[in-house]
Amino acid sequence: MTPRLLLAAVAALACGCGAGGGATRVGSKEDTESPLLGEMAAQLVRSAGDPARHQARLGGTAVVWEALRAGQLDVYPEFTGTLALQVYNDPA
């Protein structure tokens, strides 16, 4: 899947994810690519007619992942390798 299609898929899944019908909360990590991808996802959600709020540069993987798990975010962009190694501890 190309990055563009992956981002579109993430944005499609995020539409309507906002808690209580509010804005979809898109987060991003504090690196180079994540804020750009997060803003792109937020704009895709908005272009689908749903409100979105991008919270940029929240911190590293652990910080943003925990915000997602705690329900403070609805979605954030992440590399599959980072998920496998840092979140799931599974290099396979």
Image (tube, helix red, strand yellow):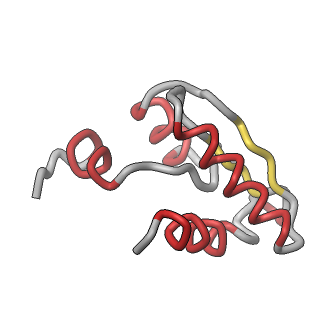
Q: Residue at x 26, y 39 (%)?
A: 86
Q: Residue at x 56, y 74 (%)?
A: 9
Number of numbered discs present?
A: 0
Q: Is residue 52 above or below residue 16?
A: above
Q: Residue at x 71, y 47 (%)?
A: 39
Q: Position of residue 53 (x, y in %)?
A: 80, 47
Q: Is residue 23 above or below residue 21?
A: above
Please give left or right for residue 40 compared with residue 33 in the image: right
Please give left or right for residue 21 compared with residue 44 in the image: right
Q: Quadrant of the C terminus?
A: bottom left
Q: Position of residue 16 (x, y in %)?
A: 75, 71
Q: Position of residue 28 (x, y in %)?
A: 59, 39
Q: Quadrant of the N terminus?
A: bottom left
Please give left or right for residue 1 compared with residue 35 in the image: left
Q: Residue at x 40, y 32 (%)?
A: 62
Would you identify the image quadrant in which residue 19 lies?
A: bottom right
Q: Position of residue 63 (x, y in %)?
A: 48, 30
Please give left or right for residue 5 compared with residue 56 in the image: left
State the residue lying farthest toward the left: 92
